[in-house]
Image (spheres, grey):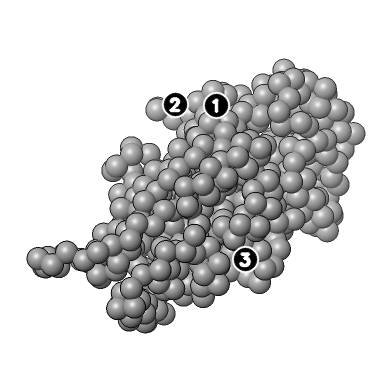
Amino acid sequence: MSQQVPVQKKREVIKLFAVLVIGLLVGVSIGYLIAPRPSTPAQKLTTTVLIGALLPLTGDLSSFGKRNQRALELAVEDINAFAEQVGSPFRFRLVVEDTGTNPEQARAKIQALAAQGVQAVVGPMASSEVSQVKQFADANKIVVISQSSTAPSLSIAGDYIFRVVPNDAYQGRALARLVFDSGFRGAAVIYRNDAWGKGLFDAFSARFRELGGRVEGVAYDPNAQDVSGEVARLADIASKLGPATAVVLISFEDDGIRVVQAAAQNPTLSKLKWFGTDGTSGSSKMAQQIGEQLVTLGGLVSTVFQPGKNSLQENFKAKFKSRFGEDPDAYSMNAYDAAWLIALSVMATGQYSGEAIARALPTIAQHYYGVTGNTALDQTGDRAAGDYAAWKVVKTDKGYEWVLVAIYSLATDSWTPAGSGG
C-alpha cells in the first residue's frame, strides 16, 4: 500500500533528493553526513516506513543472520538520524522475520511482512530462499534486496529481486583461480543440491576446466542428517583424480559441519587440502565446533565477496565492533547499504511503494557510495562486479578464528597474499 505525503512535503523531499544526488556524485556517503545541528521547536509530522528483513536467525546460516540483524539495526539508527537532521518527513522502522534458512519458511515470512504493509525487504540470504519468495514478491510488487544471494539463475531483468552482491559467475572464477594457483589440478567437489550449490558448482567447474584442471562433484541433500554415502563417493572421486587434488566444499554452516565431521574419519579425504566458499567463510559456528578438524584440512580456505576498503567502511567496522564485540562480515555490510538504498528510494520518490522503489533503486544504487563502496547494479539488478577475499581458520590464543589470507582482483584474475601490499 502506498502512503502519500502532502504536496508541501513532496516538494521538500524533491529538494532534499537533489541535494543528496549532488553529494553522492562526489562520493559522499549518506550514512556519514550526519552532523549535530540546532534543534527547532516546531515538530513536523512524520510518516513511519517499515523496512522488512528476512534473516536466518536459526538454521544453517544463523551466525551470519545474527550479524546481519545487528548491521540493519545500526543502519536504521543512522538513517533516522539523517532523516531528522535534513527534515525528511519519513522515519524508518526495522521489522525482522526469521527464515530459519528454510525456503518454505522464507515464503511464509514474506507473506507475514506483506500483511504488515511492508513494501521493501532486505534478504533473504540464501538463494534457495530467494527463489521461494520471488513469485510472491513479483506478484505483489514487493522489493527484495538480498545481501548475499549469488545463484546465477536468479539474475533476471525486470523483476522485483535485487542483489547487492555479484552473482557466482564471479565467485566461480575467483575460486577456480585460487585452487589452480595453489598447485592443484584436480578438484573433488561436494555441494548442496539447491539453486546456490548447483550454480556455484557449475561456475567453478567451467572455469577450472578452462584453466586446465579436472573436476568431478557429488551433490547432497542439505537437509540430510547422514551424508556418509556422499562423503564416501567424494573419497572415490578424489582417489581417481590423483595426488594433486583438492576438495572443494560448497555448503552452509550446519550441513558443512556434518560433511567435515564425516570426512575427518576418511583416510583419503582427511589428508587433502580443503577449500570453501562464502557459505562457510567467517562462520563462527564452524570455527567453534570443528575448528581443530578444519585446521587439519588446511583451514578450509574460503572465498567471499570483498568490498573495497574505504574510510566509511573502517568507521562502520569500528562502530560495529564497539557495539557488538565482533567484526562485521562482508554480507553484514551489504545489508547495511541495502537498507540505505531502500530509505533513499523512499525519500526520492516521496512515497512508500514497492513499485516506486523498484523504479528508483537502480539510479540510487548507481550514485550511492556506502560502506561497501559504490553499489551500481547491472541490467539484471545484481551488483555489477566485485573482488573477493580468501579466509581460513587458524588456531590462536583465543581459540579457532578466521583470518584473511589473500585478496582476488577481478581486473587481473589474480590472488595476492594479504599484507603483501600488492
Q: Which mark is residue 381?
A: 3
Location of residue 203 in the rendering, given as x and y in whole percent from the top left corner: 76, 54
Which residue type carries mark 1? Answer: Gly
Q: Nearer the viewer, residue 103 or 191?
A: 103
Furthest toward the right, the residue is 240
Is residue 397 shown above or below 4?
above
Is 354 left or right of 184, judged from the image as shown? left
Is residue 170 shown above or below 58?
below
Residue plotted at (86% across, 47% down): 214
The quarter holding residue 393 reads: top right
Q: Cβ–Cβ below 8 Å for labels 1 and 2?
A: yes
Which residue type carries mark 2? Answer: Gly
Instruction: Compute the Cα span from label 1 to label 2.
Output: 8 Å
Badge 1: residue crowd in 10 Å (few <14, some 14–19, many ≥20): many
Q: Earlier in the sequence, mark 1 or mark 3?
A: 1
Badge 2: residue crowd in 10 Å (few <14, some 14–19, many ≥20): few
For discs 1 and 3, the disc positioned in front in the rendered view = 3
* Label 2 secondary element: strand
Instruction: Compute the Cα span from label 3 to label 2.
Output: 40 Å
Q: Is residue 384 visible?
A: no
Mark 2 sits on what residue?
Answer: 399
Q: Which mark is residue 112?
A: none
